[in-house]
Image (spheres, rainbow, N blue to C red):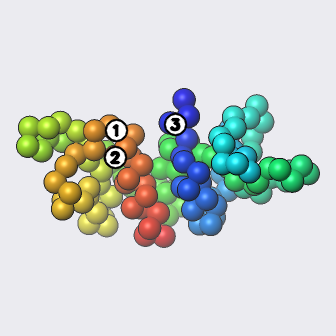
Amino acid sequence: MKDQFVDYQTALRLKKLGFEEECIAFYLFDKQLQLSCAVYNNNSYWKDSKFKELSAPLWQQVTKWLREVHHFNMYITPSTHNDIEGWKYCLPGTGIWTPQANKKNYPTYELALSEGLTEALKLI
C-alpha cells in the first residue's frame, strides 16, 4: 500500500510548492511513512519534536491538486515501442510527453504517473 503515497522527496517538494491538503499519512523525522487514523496536513502542529510536519499525499491527491490549483491535466496511456508494451504520460497543453529521447515505455502505470507528476511539478 505504501506505493500509493508519494515518496519523501516529492512530499518535500509539494510542501515547498504550497500543498496543504489533508492526508491520511505523513513522514516521520527519519523519512519513514506513517499511516494515521487522523487527518494530517502540512500545517498540523505536533508538540513532540521528533515529528516533522510533512504530509504524505496519495498520488491521486497530487493529480487532483495539480488539476484544480495549477490547471495541469495529465493522463497515462498504454504504449508499445519496439514491440515492448508499457506506459507513457502526457501533460496536455504543455507539449510534455514521456521524453521521446529515452525511446522507452515505463513498465508500470505507477512509474509513468510518478515521472509525469515530477515533470508537472517542475513547471510550477
Residue 112 - label: 2
- Asked which quadrant contains residue 87, the reply is top left
Q: Is residue 103 left or right of residue 117?
A: left
Residue 72 in the image: above or below residue 48: below
Q: Nearer the viewer, residue 64 or 99?
A: 99
Residue 53 visible to the viewer: yes
Residue drawn 74% across the image and 51% down it: 29
Q: Is residue 52 left or right of residue 120?
A: right
Q: Secondary structure under badge 3? A: helix
Residue 23 visible to the viewer: no
- Report the amino acid beneath label 1: Tyr
- Report the amino acid beneath label 2: Ala
Furthest residue toward left:
82
Q: Which residue is mark 3?
A: 4
Q: What is the CA distance from the residue labelled 3 to the residue labelled 1? A: 12 Å
Q: Is residue 118 left or right of residue 11?
A: left
